[in-house]
Amino acid sequence: MTCCPCCEPLAWVCRLALLLSVSAATAFSVLSLASCEFIYAKNDSTSVFIGLYMYPDDTGACQLYGSDTVFDAQTNTARACGAIAAMIGAGTFVTLLWESICCEIPCGKFLEVLGLLLATGCQGLTFMIFASGETCQSLKELSMLEFFDGNFNTGDSSGGVAGILENYPCQIGKSGGFSITAMGLFGISMLVCCMSWRPEPCMSK
């Protein structure tokens, strides 16, 4: 529903804030996929970490996992949901921008709120990786500099790194923080979208 003329300035303030928050959420969602520090285990002398789609090579640079890398169901869910959240966020931003400039889309507000709700949920499901005991244990068995080549089937057979990190829990890394930020911004955007008036599109004035 388009707002009355007297509320138009407030509606535009809300729409601009909404566009900014959705674009920021989508950017953080993409950053959470593009880093190799989503989950890590460390003690005072040893630190190993991996991302949803990338891992650190022997120079510390992020590399995509090989096509033969096998993940368990929880990690695959986390990976898929991260990508879905970013795509839904981008699609919702384009829809909002189109409605702001060109014309309203039938059921546009419903679709935008639903999209942001799904993006919030999917972004939260990236943390299913912490429900994967297999991934966490595999992480502890990896030595970033010597043993890890992007395939979880390749680990430290001596158990050295695993032994060092065995009693240290897997923790949220930098890109995990990006995912939390994206989830929060998607949730806030959903509330703003649900409760705010829709301004009149620029080209219809």
Image (cartoon, grey):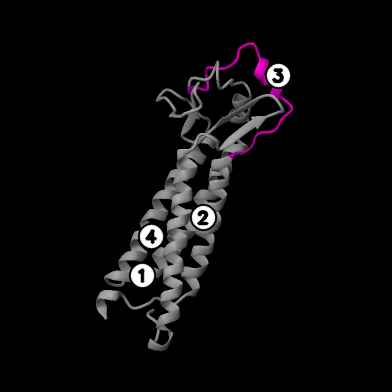
User: 106 above or below 131?
Assistant: below
Q: What kind of element bears circle 1?
A: loop
* Contact between labelled residues 1 and 4, with CB atoms less than 8 Å apart: no
Q: Earlier in the sequence, mark 2 or mark 3?
A: 2
Q: Amino acid at mark 3?
A: Gly
Q: Earlier in the sequence, mark 2 or mark 1?
A: 1
Of discs 3 and 1, which sits in the foreground?
3
**Rounded to the nearest whole Å, what is the CA distance between mark 2 and mark 1?**
20 Å
Quadrant of the rendered image containing residue 160: top right
Disc 3 target residue = 163
Please give the range of residues in magenta: 150-173
* Contact between labelled residues 3 and 2, with CB atoms less than 8 Å apart: no
Query: Of helix, strand and loop, which mostly describes the magenta segment?
Result: loop
Disc 1 target residue = 107
Disc 4 target residue = 93
Q: Position of residue 75 (x, y in %)?
A: 53, 35
Q: Is residue 171 left or right of residue 167?
A: left
User: 138 above or below 118?
Assistant: above
Q: Earlier in the sequence, mark 4 or mark 1?
A: 4
* Contact between labelled residues 3 and 4, with CB atoms less than 8 Å apart: no
Q: Earlier in the sequence, mark 3 or mark 1?
A: 1
